[in-house]
Image (cartoon, rainbow, N blue to C red):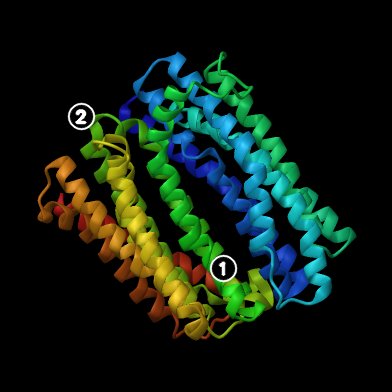
Amino acid sequence: MSKRRSTGLSILAAVARHVASGLAGFVTIPLVAYALGANGVAAWALIGTAAFALGLSDLGLSVAVQRAATQKGDAEVHEAVRAATSSVALIAPVLAFASYTWMLDFDNAPTALREDAAVAGVVALSGGVVMAYGFPFRSLAVVRGALGSLAAARALAALVQVVVTSLLLWWRASLLGPAIGLAVASVVETVSLIVVARRVDPRVPLVPRIPSWARAQSLFHEGAPSVVVNLAAVLAMRFDIVILSRVAPLAAVAAYGVAFRAVDQSFTLAKQASTALMPRLAKSAERAAAIKLGTIVVGGLVASGMAALATRGHPLLRAWAGEAAMHPQMAAAVALLGGAAVVAAGHEVMASAVTLGGRSAWDAAVPLSLGYAVNLAISLAGASRFGILAVAGGTLIGNIVTGALVWKRGRALLGWDPSAVGRLLTPVAIAGLCACTVGLALGALPVDSALGSIVSCTVAMAAGLAALALVRRKLA
């Protein structure tokens, strides 16, 4: 099989996995919206944020598993897996309690909703603990090229989540339904991840074991950059919605949650190319070509898609999330978060390359963390006065800071001059501008339905991608 075909299949497998993952969230939002209204969407967004924070419980050791799997032998890989699962077993329950106590404390909700969220939060966080235990096994499977199997595992879990959530919400309108769906899906996916990991490495250990102090220090040294970045990301991006819940009505929280979910899922779908390219990014001989391919693919898809969503996606979002998408600042949130996603797409693959090929993982961790810090500072300073505009705008500005610093490190790694970066990013920028222009032009048509929105977004995105291909060919 040719290298190009192998890479293409890996990208398709990674995209398929995220499509399955995104399907669960895509279906859950309208189920909650139409059963519980905008307040229910806001509460579920906060519960989801609390569960997402449990991804910090591996203390970055899942990255140590990846680095061991690409650079060391089986013994070191197995030791890293044991250490990572030990960290999750010890830290996740404590982190779940802290998340529950602090993130789910929202006083601006009706009493019945608070009581419902209190019970649902326990169930969802329990599922989050189980899911966190599977992270080290997923990291091993990604590096060993088992993306197709991971996609199948996620598809099964997503199907289970949607079915369970739908049935329980049909039986009773309560946040407990989606919480149970999430918990059951977490068990299904974690078991599947272990099966996949055992398939690529039959001797991978399943039971945690704390390593020696010296080895633990070495592993945590490798994982520290990842945990710093992940912590900063939770505080800056996922935590935005918690900040907003303290100073704004639940209607604003729901609108921001819907905008963030729509943009984040679209961005994460496109950036699966970066995941698929990891084996090539880890090899110095193939790194430059992989960066060029990944940046064009990820950047072009995100720039075209976000421009289309921001200009022509509003009727679709309203049909998807109901009253939660009708907030006056909804359009601004989509535009600002979409712009932030475009900036992130421009440095996504380079950040992965710097993480894997730099002198240490700190080469990428520092720029990412500084950008997240800027985001968090703007959100904290401006949320009480500007609401959604502050938290979404902080994300955009923070990503600009990160992008500038990542490309500075990346140019040093590859020996590129600024003009090489400009030639790589110019087609991405043109794709976004073309899609935006077409989307705005289509706005003159008297179409305000979900179907019309889908057609308009498709046309605008296709125009952007066509411009990307044309400009890229001329610059090649």
Residue 459 shown left or right of residue 86 in the figure: left
Which residue occupies 82% across, 74% down? 111
> Pointer 2: what residue?
285
**Label 2 with label 1: CB-CB less than 8 Å:** no
Position of residue 235 relative to residue 275, above or below, is below
The answer to whether residue 155 of the structure is visible from this angle is no
Position of residue 204 relative to residue 221, above or below, is above
Tell me residue 241's x, y (percent).
56, 68
**Viewer-nearest residue: 62 or 347:** 62
Q: SS for tag 1? A: helix
User: Splitting the image into 4 quarters, where does residue 232 fall?
Assistant: bottom left
Looking at the rendered image, the quarter that the N terminus falls into is top left
**Viewer-nearest residue: 216 or 108:** 216
Three-letter amino acid code of the residue under disc 2: Ala
Q: What is the crowding at mark 1: few (fewer than 14 residues within 10 Å), some, or many (at least 20)?
A: many
Tell me residue 439's x, y (percent).
41, 75
> Pointer 1: what residue?
241
Position of residue 167 relative to residue 442, above or below, is above
Tell me residue 164's x, y (percent).
79, 49
Which residue occupies 62% across, 36% down? 90
**C-alpha span from label 2 to label 1:** 42 Å
Residue 139 shown left or right of residue 251 in the figure: left
- Considering every residue shown, the one lying at the far right of the view is 171
